[in-house]
Image: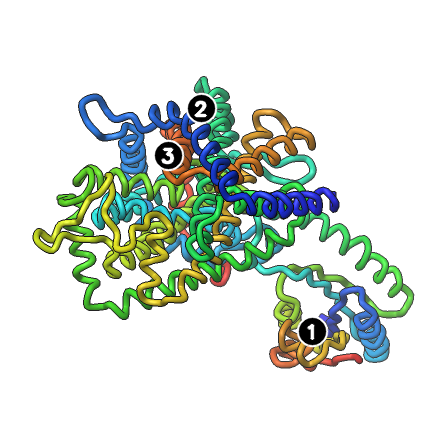
Amino acid sequence: MSAKYLVGFDGSEASKRALSFAVERAAAAGRSVVIAHVLEWSPYSFLTPTELEERHARRKEEIERAETALLAPVIAEMSGKGVEVETALKYGHIANTLNELANADGVEQIFIGRNGHSGVGARIFGSVAGTLVQIAPVPCTIVP
Amino acid sequence: MKHLYQRAFGLAALLALVLAHSPAQAQSIDEKVNQIFANSTGWFVAFIFSPFPGTSFPWIVAWLVIAATVFTLYFLFIQFRAFGHSIALVRGDYSDPNDAGEVSHFQALATALSGTVGLGNIAGVAVAVGIGGPGATFWMILAGLMGMASKFTECTLGVKYRNEFADGHVSGGPMYYLTKGFAERGLPGGGILAVLFSIFCILGSLGGGNMFQANQAHQQIAGIVGDYPGWITGVIFAAVVFAVIIGGLKSIASVTEKVVPFMGVMYVIAALIIILTNYDKIGWAFGQIFAGAFTGLGVAGGMVGALIQGFKRAAFSNEAGVGSAAIAHSAVRTKEPITEGFVSLLEPFIDTVVICTMTALVIIISGQLVTDPATGLYVVENGAIKTATGSSGVGLTSDAFASAFTWFPYVLALAVILFAFSTMISWSYYGLKAWTYLFGEGETKELAFKVIFCIFVVIGAAANLGPVIDFSDAAIFSMAVVNVFGLYFLMPIVKRELNSYLSRLKSGEIRKFSEA
């Protein structure tokens, strides 16, 4: 099994920069790239009865949107760059889920973009990059 | 739609301002509303609570006691056998990580709890203890423990027979399991029961899920800011409910849903502090609860009165057997409907056995119930125990908490408003589901129900507690009559599911995902 680079991707400019950076290095090192998109979701959040009723339909919509509007274009963009690319679409806490994916066989480095939250904002809402560097099992590169 | 709710707010504020400046006129509006309401619902209340001939025991209470006992015995005390497994399911130990993104067991339980934990736990308990004495608490706890089996039965069926529509949304509840379950068993009458249930569910949503909430919220606010006409609270509440259910301001509901659990936790912590700081009275309080349960001495109605109040208020609070929770629980995504039955049985435990008991203990320990120094018996006046401040309902609970923390009525008022609001939103949903089952889905039809629901908020806040609580009880218990009747015929289906699941759990076919 060839070694892989894992890239956290949410369609933002920061994540696009992280992906380009990872792909360049993967091409040079002969690695493949896993583009991971995590849909933020907690099984412990509180929902109203209407939200409960619509949750299943909403999940379908979220997956379809992620596959068609986010992952499909990026895969098309990556073709011809000489790097083998695969995608992963997951639900959960972003940093924890990327960490779980990084624990899979063959992942030797994680790449993520930095969204530039202020210190206060990151403290209140949590920072994906901050959490990931604390828990990642492999080296983690944060692309500014 | 945006200016629809802006107009509603504006109109509500204007009405409140104009009529607040003419108290005599406003008071007469309250009185008229009360009189019309009491006259038009009296016959229904009288029928539901009519006693067995020659006794004072209402047949509806016997109906609920028998149902909870039957389910408890039929499923061999499932509420105690499955308790640990239920907690593991809520924790997500058995949830497939690949199914993430769906409604979790925790979410279904939390949503159902936010509809049930509320004024029943604060005001309802005060009503039970105020009339039936401390002994009512014993029967309330027993009703809660046995009600766990009723909830297990109905919520399993709610998931098993829910409807999954083409656009992906799911809808469930007694309406669906009564029709589909009866058809599956080849039994006639499922459709009639479903229609009857829907009618009573609409009345229940307007009564207990709406008017009772508005009424008690007004009483609590008036207790703090001073007496003023109830319809003013009603109009303001109606405007906010209107904004959420018609205006689509989901953010209000979604904020409430997040705040309510914290309010619940805070309420329990405050009760625990009062109980623990009076630790020397805990033994005495439980003594009063046990003694009162079997003697009912010095209490209106004696032992039977305590039992009736205990069971009535427990059923009103945890809604076991009523069928409403089956609607909230049915959205969970699981391959095994029985797992939602297991999870739902925690609901009466948290609601009644834990929270209601704490409220009752605080009222008893704080000495709000007046006793005769000569005999040591409770002093009964006008069919209820005399209280230290003359209050009843939510006012009694507020006084009990205020005896330890003078500032608590303010916090309680906020909690009551939020609890009342979240219960109203939940019940507007239950009522709407029943309404659309009867009349079909459609924007105009749904709008009609929502407008009626908002009007009843005002009526509930303006009417007196007596007629409101009687109608609320009658409407909710009539749901239980139909639902429980159906459950008797459908419980073999639940038993089949239970046996199959337990044997696969025992054989190791069903395992925790952490162990898989």
Chain holding disc 1 = A
Query: In the picture, residue B245 is in which quadrant?
Result: top right
Residue closest to the eye, A117 or B334: A117
In the image, is residue B115 above or below residue B267? above
Residue type for callout 2 = Arg
Q: Residues within 10 Å of mark 3 (few under 14, many from 20)?
A: many
**Residue beneath disc 1:** A107
Q: Which residue is depicted at the point 33% across and 68% down?
A: B273
Can I make out residue A54 in this image? no
Q: Which residue is depicted at the point 39% across and 40% down?
A: B465
In the image, is residue B229 above or below residue A103? above
Can I make out residue B119 in this image? yes
Q: Which mark is residue B470?
A: 3
Q: Determine the CA span between mark 3 and mark 2.
A: 36 Å
From the image, state whether disc 1 or disc 3 is nearer to you: 3
Q: Is residue B182 left or right of residue B138?
A: right
